[in-house]
Amino acid sequence: MITSGSWRTKSFKSYNFKALGVPPAAGHLHPLMKVRSEYRQIFLEMGFTEMPTNNFVESSFWNFDALFQPQQHPARDAHDTFFLKDPMYSHTFPMEYLQRVKRTHERGGYGSTGYQYSWKYEEAQKNLLRTHTTAVSARMLYQLGQQEEFTPVKWFSIDRVFRNETLDATHLAEFHQIEGVVADYNLTLGHLMGMLYEFFKKLGIEKLRFKPAYNPYTEPSMEVFSYHEGLGKWVEVGNSGMFRPEMLLPMGLPREVSVIAWGVSLERPTMIKYRSEQHSRVGRSQGRSANGPR
Ligand code: PHE
């Protein structure tokens, strides 16, 4: 039309500078965020409610003591945990409950002999970057124990945790944990295994194996392995257990109530899903796994 000059006799509509453009095919959600929303969806389908996890800074009390983790436990060392310089200490705790925690560590009770050592308030006051989201579960279970009447709950959380790791290609000082918690009357290890099968099935993982493990706050405890078709071997995917009476009874939960729980790292399954070259290295430093015993 330009070369022939025919444009002179045609009529054109005016250009609309306000029209929406074609969206550019660039930018995407981070893989971790995608897998995170998949997990959230699975928990919601299973009737779980999300716990508030918006506090990276936690006191040793909720991260360790409330979980019946003795004050001389190696995970409470500065080599394993980031402690805060400022503010160094927490000052507000539910004092009656704190006294029961102290007594349970020192002398036991509830059918336990405790750890037989002298429990220090100053140690529990020390602030840190939470090393696991089980600290959040502990706060929530304490609140549940304060309720006039117990009501069964199914809770989950997905958020960041911090460990003082030596950094390399497969180890970061921060990662994400996914945690599921169920509290009800007369729960058994069978319920926990059933929950785990259901949970992993929704992720497309059907073959599971359980291995006895140790956590200061659960008994029995089980590591969870799944068969990875691509790698052709069993890989550890999580850690689980039934919270100990030494943890639950000082919180005020009824004796007949059991609490089953499990923790999974978000990074491990994401690496497997996206076929990262690094995913075959399972262990974290110092012989601990991503969800290893704390
Ligand atoms: N807190 C454990 C970890 O960091 C995971 C876990 C959660 C284990 C709940 C048992 C019960 O590895």
Image: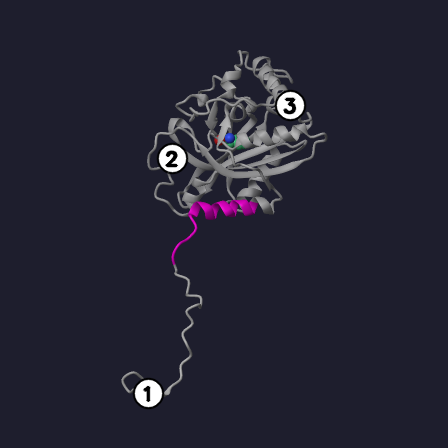
150 is higher (above) or lower (below) than 122: below
Residue picked out by circle 1? 6
Query: What amino acid is found at the position of numbered circle 3 in the picture?
Result: Leu
Q: Let me know if residue 184 appears in the view.
A: yes
Q: Let me know if residue 204 appears in the view.
A: no
* Sooner in the amino-acid sequence: mark 1 or mark 2: 1
Residue 210 in picture, x, y percent from top left: 52, 34
Splitting the image into 4 quarters, where does residue 5 fall?
A: bottom left
Residue 192 in picture, x, y percent from top left: 59, 35
* Dot label at residue 249: 3
Mark 3 near mark 2, Cβ–Cβ under 8 Å? no
Residue picked out by circle 2? 172
- Is residue 234 shown left or right of residue 240? left
* Dot label at residue 175: none
Mark 1 near mark 3, Cβ–Cβ under 8 Å? no
Mark nearest the camera among 1 and 3 is 1
Query: Which portion, as a residue range, is magenta?
Result: 26-42
**Mark 2: few/some/many CA within 10 Å (<14, 14-19, 20+):** some
**Mark 3: few/some/many CA within 10 Å (<14, 14-19, 20+):** some
Q: How many marks?
A: 3
Q: Residue at coordinates 53% horizontally, 16% vertically from top-left?
A: 121
Query: What amino acid is found at the position of numbered circle 2 in the picture?
Result: Leu
Q: Residue furthest left?
A: 3
Q: Foreground residue, 58 or 158?
A: 58
Quadrant in which the N terminus appears: bottom left
